[in-house]
Amino acid sequence: MNLPLLLQFLAMTDELRSREEAIPEFVRLLERYGFDHHVVVRQPKPNEDVRRLLLSERAPREWLDLYIAKKYIAIDPTMRYLGHAQRGFRWREALAAFRSDPHRRRMERMMAEARRHGLLDGYIFPVHGRRGLLGAVSVGGRPVDLSPVEITLFDAIAEKLFWKLLEWSDPVVRDELVSRVEVQLTRREMEALNYLAEGKTSNEISKILEISNHTVDWYMNGIQEKLKARNRHHTVALAFRLGLIS
C-alpha cells in the first residue's frame, strides 16, 4: 500500500497544465503500483468506434486492434458492468456478474485473449456526471491487489484525470457535459415520469394520481416534447441520463 503516492498525485492534478505533463506523471504512478497499461475513454455506444473516444491509452496495439475488429465493446463485461457501478472494481469481478448471460462464452474468450496480450488483470473506474456515466479509466497488466482505500483514491484520481484530459482534448464537449440541464418539469410531470420509470402503464398511473388516462397521456406528451424524446422508452432513458430520475 502506498497511500502517500496516491495522495501526492491527487494533489498535483490541479497544477498540471497540459496532456504532455499529465500522462507521463500518471504512467509513472501506475508503474510504481505495478500496472503496465491504461485506457482513459469516454463512454462509447455499442457500435461506436472506441478510438475516437480515447483520451489516453497505453495498451498493446494488437489488442486494441483486435478489440475493435471483433466489436468486443458490445459484450465487454467491464464496460457493461460500469453502468451499475458507483466505484472502481476489478475486471474479474465484472465477469463474475454475468454468469447466466447469453454472451458469457464470448466474454470469457475476450478475457482470455486479453490475458494472451499481457492484460492479466486490472481495475476499471467509472466517471459520472450530470448526464450519468460519462467514461472510465482502466488500468491493468500484471495482477495487483488494491485495498478498498486505494480503490477509493484511484476513483478520485480517475475522475480528476478524465476531466483534465477532456478539457485539453475537446473543451466544447467538456463544457456540454458539465452544463446545467435546462429541463423544467412540473410536479405532476415529475410524478408521472417516476411512475413511468417504474414500468407502470398510463392506466396504473392515472389511478395512483387520481386523474384520467387522457391527462396522463397529456403529461407524457409534454415530457417527451421537453426532452425531445422519440417515445416513452427514450423518455425514460434520457431522464436517467440527465439525472431527472434515479
Image (cartoon, rainbow, N blue to C red):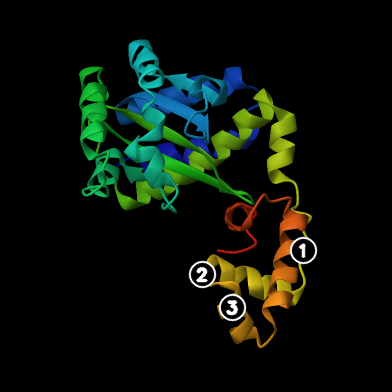
Which amino acid is tagged 2? Glu
First in sequence, mark 3 or 1: give its number.
3
Measure the alpha-carbon separation of dots 3 and 2: 14 Å
Q: Residue at x 20, y 26 (%)?
A: 112
* Helix, strand or loop under label 2: loop
228 or 182, which lies in front? 228
Q: Nearer the viewer, mark 3 or mark 2?
A: 3
- Expressed as whole percent of the image width and height from the top left, the position of residue 96 reads 23, 47
- Tag 1: amino acid: Gly
Would you name the residue on which mark 3 appears? Answer: 203
Residue lying at 75% horizontally and 52% vertically, measured from the top left: 180
Q: Residues within 10 Å of mark 1 (few under 14, many from 20)?
A: some
The percent coordinates of residue 240 (x first, y second) are 58, 57
Distance, label 2 to label 1, CA atoms, is 19 Å
Q: Residue under circle 1?
A: 222
Q: Earlier in the sequence, mark 3 or mark 2?
A: 2
Secondary structure beneath label 3: helix
Q: Which quarter shows the C terminus?
A: bottom right
* Relative to 99, 228 lies left or right: right
Give the numbered dot on residue 151.
none
Seen at 69% across and 85% down, the residue is 211
Residue type at mark 3 is Asn
- Residue under circle 2? 198
In this rendering, the label closer to the viewer, 2 or 1:
1
Residue 18: x, y in percent? 65, 22
Q: Position of residue 158 (x, y in %)?
A: 49, 39
